Amino acid sequence: MRQEERMGLILEELAGGGSVGVAEIAAKLGVSTASIRRDLQLLEKQRLLSRTHGGAVANSTAYELPLRYRGGRRRDEKRRIAAAAAARIGDDIASVGLTGGTTTTEVARRLADRQGLTVVTNALNIAAELAVRPDLKLIVTGGAARSESYELVGPLAEATLEGMNLDLAVVGVDGITVEGGLTTHHDIEAHTNRVLIGRARRVIVVADGSKVGRLAFARICDVSAVHELITDASAPAPELRRLAEAGIVITTV
């Protein structure tokens, strides 16, 4: 297991439980305690946690996992979700908007060989992967870059999006509930994503089961803006029922 993947899993454990123990996480990941201590030391230098005797604790309760450390878990689920979303993008779809995130990145990878498709994104990592693909048209917004998500946000990004009409938007979120709508950790990112959603005829949310029923800090929009949610079988059934009753098509993979 690569160090970056290990550190992502450590941070996910912290996000879920608030603390980790060296021996416990080493056994769970099948590596030495020395390796885990080195990982914790590096993560502390990045101010992503605080080390304690025998482990570490999260630095805050409002925890946003940096994109480079996301996806260590639920990778297979995210790839299945992405495959289902990409299957929705047929010949009748000429333009698609993609927000940032690990699952939307997987969607982008499945669109790389499409011919004649226009992809609009505010995610720098997605743009870097698609820029070398000659058969599709790539449009990247301007804006201020967020190091946590690699997304371009703010007035410049929104001004770019305001001039476009998209057939489809594929949106990643940090949380989705009927009452709270679509949510993310960062308020400016939420506003930029709201503008992208508003420019699309159809909106698909791609979110693994851990995001369903979860409420993050900043509201993107109401669930009434969403046509379909693609998630996995771990999503809580009661919340899926409420979302379906709100008019969203639910697809589990």
Image (spheres, helix red, strand yellow):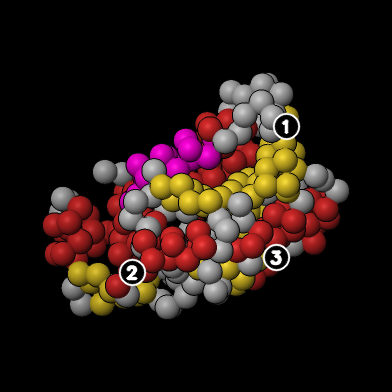
The amino acid at mark 2 is Gly
Q: Is residue 73 magenta?
A: yes
Q: Magenta span: helix, strand or loop, mainly?
A: helix
Q: Position of residue 19 (x, y in %)?
A: 28, 74
Residue 198's tag is none
Task: Tell me what residue is drawn at x 47 percent, y 75 percent.
Answer: 62
Residue 94's tag is 1
Q: Position of residue 89 (x, y in %)?
A: 61, 33
The amino acid at mark 1 is Ala
Distance (Cα) linking label 3 and label 1: 25 Å
Q: Earlier in the sequence, mark 3 or mark 1?
A: 1
The answer to whether residue 4 shows anywhere in this view is no
Q: Earlier in the sequence, mark 2 or mark 1?
A: 2
Mark 2, residue position: 16
Tag 3, which secondary structure? helix
Start-end of magenta stretch: 72-86
How dense is the environment of label 3, judged by Cα within 10 Å: few (below 14), some, or many (20 and up)?
A: many
Distance (Cα) linking label 2 and label 3: 26 Å
Q: Quadrant of residue 8?
A: bottom left
The answer to whether residue 105 shows anywhere in this view is yes
Task: Tell me what residue is drawn at x 47 percent, y 66 percent.
Answer: 242
How dense is the environment of label 2, judged by Cα within 10 Å: few (below 14), some, or many (20 and up)?
A: few
